[in-house]
Amino acid sequence: MTNTALITGATGGLGNEFVKLFAANGNNLVLVGRNAKKLAKLKRKVENDYLIKAETIAVDFSEETAAEQIYEQVKKLGIQIDYLINNAGLGGQGSFIERTMEQDVSMMNVNMLVPTKLMKLFIPDFVKQGSGKILNVSSSAALIPGPLQAEYYATKAYVTSLSNAIAYEVKDTGVTITTLMPGAIDTGFAQAGGLTETKMFANGASPVAVANAGYKAMLAGKLNVFAGLSPVQRPFVGLMPLMPKKAIMGFVANQQSNPS
């Protein structure tokens, strides 16, 4: 029986790499994103290149009912989802008082509300069928506070904490939840968030390598996986939560600046 993966943010850099990975391994796909034309083009490409079946669901992730729309459409299509990839994410630079309420609410909807609701909707189905794997794309930013990206760092801390707790709750059901915690990635995410000129994204990691790490960790049922960290960043990952908060926040704020 062929498995089916639902991938949010499917047309973006990291999402597109997940699409290719799952398709190359013979999985059917449900491609989810905002742009219907891009989704249709991606559907045609993966079906032609990999000889698998793909469906598309176009939805605005900033809407409060986005997750319900996705779930209802899957049910209408009569598809059993085996892998849920919560990849869609929204970033954005700027101080808390400068950013608009609309920007922050949209970020919280995309980064927290939608993946939470999708898990709430799909996990009971996974438990009932006795199998299912979830990959939630968080960030290494989840470990620390992030001045000038305060909301983003906080949303990723939420995703990681929630994912880990639910993973424990369902540990005896055949369902696994893996959290992918990458460093800066060289994708359209940085451009959309106004981060392309910052020190943090000066040497972004390959989305291919990050997607591969997440995919393998999900199949193995691992809890967390770090990927795309530079040789300088790797030793600090375990130490960050133990270091003085003011020093860490100063470092993070500096990384938001233009390298020139």
Image (cartoon, rainbow, N blue to C red):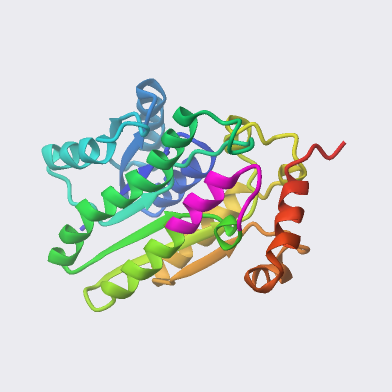
The main secondary structure of the magenta stretch is: helix
Q: Is residue 2 visible?
A: no
| Residue located at (34% from left, 29% from top) | 60
* Magenta residues (range): 145-158
In what quadrant of the picture does the C terminus appear? top right
Residue 189 placement, left or right of 19: right
> Does residue 65 sit above or below 3 in this rendering?
above
Q: Residue furthest right?
A: 260
Q: Position of residue 77 (x, y in %)?
A: 14, 38
> Does residue 94 sit above or below 23 in this rendering?
above
Q: Residue furthest front?
A: 97
Residue 7 versus residue 154: which sits nearer the camera?
154
| Residue located at (62% from left, 70% from top) | 241
As for residue 162 lying within the magenta part, the answer is no
In what quadrant of the picture does the N terminus appear? bottom left
Q: Residue furthest top?
A: 37
Residue 229 placement, left or right of 152: right
As for residue 150 lying within the magenta part, the answer is yes
- Quarter residue 170 falls in: bottom left
Q: Is residue 5 visible?
A: yes
Residue 125 placement, left or right of 109: left
| Residue located at (43% from left, 56% from top) | 159
Q: Position of residue 210 (x, y in %)?
A: 57, 55
> Does residue 185 sit above or below 230 in this rendering?
above
Q: Position of residue 73 (x, y in %)?
A: 18, 36
> Does residue 146 sit above or below 191 in this rendering?
below
Q: Residue furthest bottom?
A: 172
Residue 45 versus residue 119: which sits nearer the camera?
119
Residue 151 versus residue 165: which sits nearer the camera?
151
| Residue located at (75% from left, 34% from top) | 197
Q: Position of residue 167 (x, y in %)?
A: 34, 70
